[in-house]
Amino acid sequence: MDRGKKLYMSYCLTCHMQNGEGIPGTFPPLANADYLMEDAERSIGQIINGASGEMKVNGVVYNNVMPGFDMTDREIADVLNYIRNSWGNQGEVITEEQVHEVRDK
């Protein structure tokens, strides 16, 4: 969790804010986020490749661009484990192997 928090502070904080609340109408929340928790593989892919276009988070439609990040498999697993287990989220552990499998698709 410590490693993931440090990565979050470096890569994600600017858009998703200190407590994962996002910026209403601009950047979606990660806190208590149904979209985030529905599909771990999609979340991994979005960190690797970025995301653009409409997405519905907690009933609100967002339409913005997130860049992909040049992170190792371990770093992606760490940051997702932090995000998926903070601010009301409770998710299963993401492994480096899972990240590697998504990266290879």
Image (cartoon, rainbow, N blue to C red):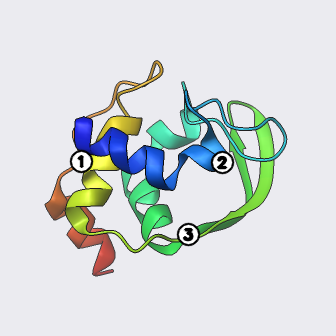
> Residue 65: horizontal and vertical position, in percent?
71, 65
Residue at x 46% of width, y 44% of height:
9
Q: Is residue 100 above or below residue 88?
A: below
For residue 50, the mark is 3
On the image, the x and y values in percent for residue 22 come to 67, 37
- Which secondary structure lies at badge 1? loop
Q: Is residue 75 left or right of residue 52?
A: left
Identity, as a three-letter code, of the amino acid under mark 3: Gly
Residue shown at 33% from the left, 80% from the top: 105
> How dense is the environment of label 3, judged by Cα within 10 Å: few (below 14), some, or many (20 and up)?
some
In this image, 78 relative to 90: left or right? left
Q: Nearer the viewer, mark 1 or mark 2?
A: 2
Label 3: which secondary element: loop
Residue 96 in view here: yes
Residue 70 relative to residue 97: left or right: right
Q: Earlier in the sequence, mark 1 or mark 2?
A: 2
> What amino acid does circle 2 point to?
Cys
Residue at the image point whose x is 30% and y is 40% from the top: 81
Check disc 1 and give the amino acid type: Ile
Mark 2 touches mark 3? (CB < 8 Å): no
Residue 15, percent from left and from top: 66, 48
Residue 19, relative to residue 45: is it above or below?
A: above
Q: Which mark is residue 15?
A: 2
Query: Circle 1 is placed at which residue position?
Result: 94
The mark that comes first in sequence, 2 or 3, is 2
- Determine the residue positioned at 56% across, 32% down: 18
The outermost residue toward the top is 88
SS category of the residue bearing label 2:
helix
